[in-house]
C-alpha cells in the first residue's frame, strides 16, 4: 500500500488505525470464530498498479473434520486442495464453474485444511476501478455482493493462489481499522451452494453484517 493510498484510506475510514492482520489471527483452531471475526475487517488489494479496498460483510467457514462441504473433507489432498494444508493466512483461490474466482483464506495450523470464504464486501476506496473491472457505470449491489463478482471487482484471480496475506507488500491483505462488530450485529445461516453436503449443508456457518445492503443475494 502506497503512503498516499494509506492516508486516503485512513481519511475515508475516519480512523487513525490500520493494522495488518498477522498469522496468529488466522492460525486459531476454530474456523467459525475466525469467519465471524473477519466480518468488519478491510480487504485490500493492489493488483496491476490499482489499489482498492472494501469492508468484509459476509463470510463462510469450512472445517477439516465433520464438514462434508469442505473441499479437503477427510484429508482429501488434491492439486486444488493442497493449498488448504498450508499456513493460516494463505490465499486459497479456485475456479467455480470454470468462470468464478473464489477467494478463501486458509486457517488453523499447517496440515489442518480449513478455510474461510469471503462472500461479499462493502466498497470503500477505488470504486471507479472496481466498476471498470465489472463493466458497471454505477456503484450498486452487484458490484461486490457475491464471491465471484467481489473477486472480479478486486482483481483477484487464481494466479494469486497461495499468496501470503500477512506480508506488508502482498497484493492481497486484510486490515483491522478498529471497526468493531457486536455479536448482536452478526447474522448466521446455512452456507450457499453446498446441498451435496447433506446434513452439513444446514450448519449455520455463514456470517454476515446485519443490515448491510452489500450482502450477497443468494439464499
Image: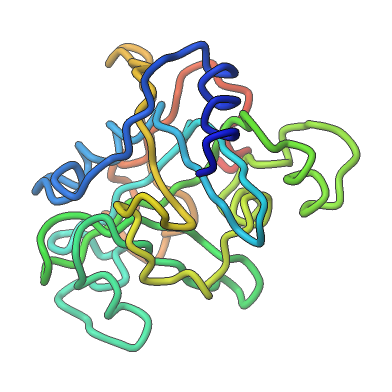
In the image, taking residue 128 as reference, residue 169 lies left or right, namely: left
Q: Residue furthest bottom?
A: 79
Q: Residue at x 18, y 42 (%)?
A: 25
Query: What coloring was used for the rendering?
Result: rainbow
Residue 27 locus on image (x, y percent): 14, 51
Count of labels shown? 0
Residue 83 locus on image (x, y percent): 30, 74
Whether 22 is drawn above or below 111: the answer is above
Q: Quadrant of the C terminus?
A: top right
Q: Which is nearer the eye, 219 or 5?
A: 5
Whether 123 is drawn above or below 44: the answer is above
Whether 162 is drawn above or below 150: the answer is below
Whether 78 is drawn above or below 92: the answer is below
Q: Which is nearer the eye, 69 or 11?
A: 11
Q: Residue at x 54, y 49 (%)?
A: 45
Residue 182 locus on image (x, y percent): 30, 12
Q: Residue at x 38, y 14 (%)?
A: 185
Residue 10 locus on image (x, y percent): 51, 21
Q: Which is nearer the eye, 1 or 35?
A: 1
In the image, taking residue 51 as reference, residue 63 lies left or right, namely: left
Q: Quadrant of residue 198?
A: bottom left
Amino acid at each position: 500500500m502506497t503512503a498516499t493510498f494509506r492516508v486516503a484510506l485512513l481519511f475515508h475510514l475516519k480512523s487513525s488505525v490500520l493494522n495488518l492482520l498477522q498469522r496468529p489471527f488466522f492460525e486459531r483452531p476454530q474456523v467459525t470464530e475466525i469467519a465471524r471475526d473477519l466480518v468488519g475487517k478491510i480487504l485490500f488489494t493492489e493488483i496491476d498498479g490499482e489499489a482498492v479496498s472494501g469492508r468484509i460483510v459476509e463470510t463462510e467457514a469450512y472445517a477439516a473434520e465433520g464438514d462434508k462441504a469442505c473441499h479437503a473433507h477427510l484429508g482429501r489432498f488434491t492439486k486444488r486442495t493442497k493449498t488448504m494444508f498450508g499456513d493460516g493466512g494463505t490465499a486459497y483461490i479456485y475456479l467455480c464453474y470454470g468462470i468464478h474466482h473464489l477467494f478463501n483464506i486458509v486457517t488453523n495450523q499447517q496440515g489442518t485444511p480449513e478455510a474461510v470464504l469471503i462472500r461479499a464486501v462493502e466498497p470503500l476506496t477505488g470504486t471507479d476501478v472496481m466498476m471498470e473491472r465489472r463493466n458497471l457505470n454505477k456503484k450498486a449491489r452487484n458490484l461486490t455482493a457475491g464471491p465471484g463478482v467481489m473477486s472480479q471487482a478486486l482483481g483477484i484471480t487464481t494466479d494469486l493462489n497461495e499468496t501470503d496475506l500477512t506480508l506488508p507488500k502482498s497484493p492481497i491483505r486484510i486490515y483491522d481499522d478498529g471497526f468493531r462488530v457486536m455479536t448482536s450485529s452478526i447474522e448466521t445461516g446455512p452456507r450457499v451452494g453446498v446441498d451435496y453436503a447433506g446434513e452439513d449443508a444446514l450448519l449455520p456457518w455463514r456470517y454476515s453484517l446485519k443490515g448491510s445492503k452489500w450482502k450477497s443475494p443468494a439464499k
